[in-house]
Amino acid sequence: MKILIAKRAEKYLKKIPKIDQIAIVRKIRLLTSPSSNEEKLKGLKNIYRVRVGNYRIVFRRTKEEIFIVLIGHRKEIYQLVNRLFQ
């Protein structure tokens, strides 16, 4: 399964502390496994989120790929999701 990362998510990932970057990248690599503790976002089709400490990874899953849409702090990520998808 292919993992793609949006420019916006990549840009945010570079701004956060190194220790959090490492944790997020590890979690992204685990998204291909079935036990990644992902939760579907209500009201959105094929959009999921994964918790990594105080950060959230929002992604779209298809049969062929996982597309990381956003990475952000838990306080602001859902406002960004609402603006982006609705």
Image (tube, helix red, strand yellow):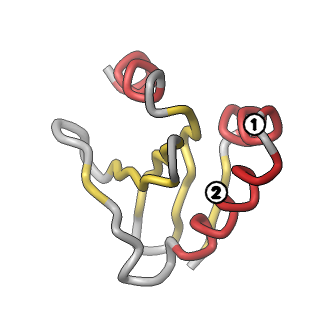
Indicate whether 56 appears above or below 62: above
Q: Quadrant of residue 73?
A: top right
For mark 1, give the secondary structure.
loop
Question: Where does residue 65 sit, x and y in percent of width and height?
Answer: 53, 68
Q: Is residue 68 left or right of residue 74?
A: right
Where is residue 81 shown, x and y percent of the image? 41, 27
The image position of residue 75, as x and y in percent, is 44, 24
Dot 2 crowding, Cα within 10 Å, few <14, some 14–19, many 20+:
many
Q: Are marks 2 and 1 in contact (CB under 8 Å)?
A: yes
In-image side of 19 versus 61 (left or right):
right
Give the total number of marks visible in the rendering: 2
Q: Is the residue 64 above or below the residue 86 in the image?
A: below
Q: Mark 2 and mark 1: span between their CA atoms?
A: 10 Å
State which quarter of the image contains the C terminus: top left
- Which comes sooner in the sequence, label 2 or label 1? 1
Identify the image quadrant of the N terminus.
Answer: bottom right
Callout 1 amino acid: Ile
Numbered label attached to residue 27? none
Which residue is farthest left? 43
- In the rendering, which numbered label is found on residue 24? 2
* Mark 1 closeness class: few <14, some 14–19, many ≥20 residues within 10 Å: few
Q: Amino acid at mark 2?
A: Ile
Please name the residue shown 39% across and 18% down the image: 79
Q: Depth check: give the residue in front, 34 or 22.
A: 22
In the structure shown, which secondary structural element does the residue marked by tag 2 occupy? helix
Q: Which residue is mark 1?
A: 16
Q: Residue at x 35, y 52 (%)?
A: 48
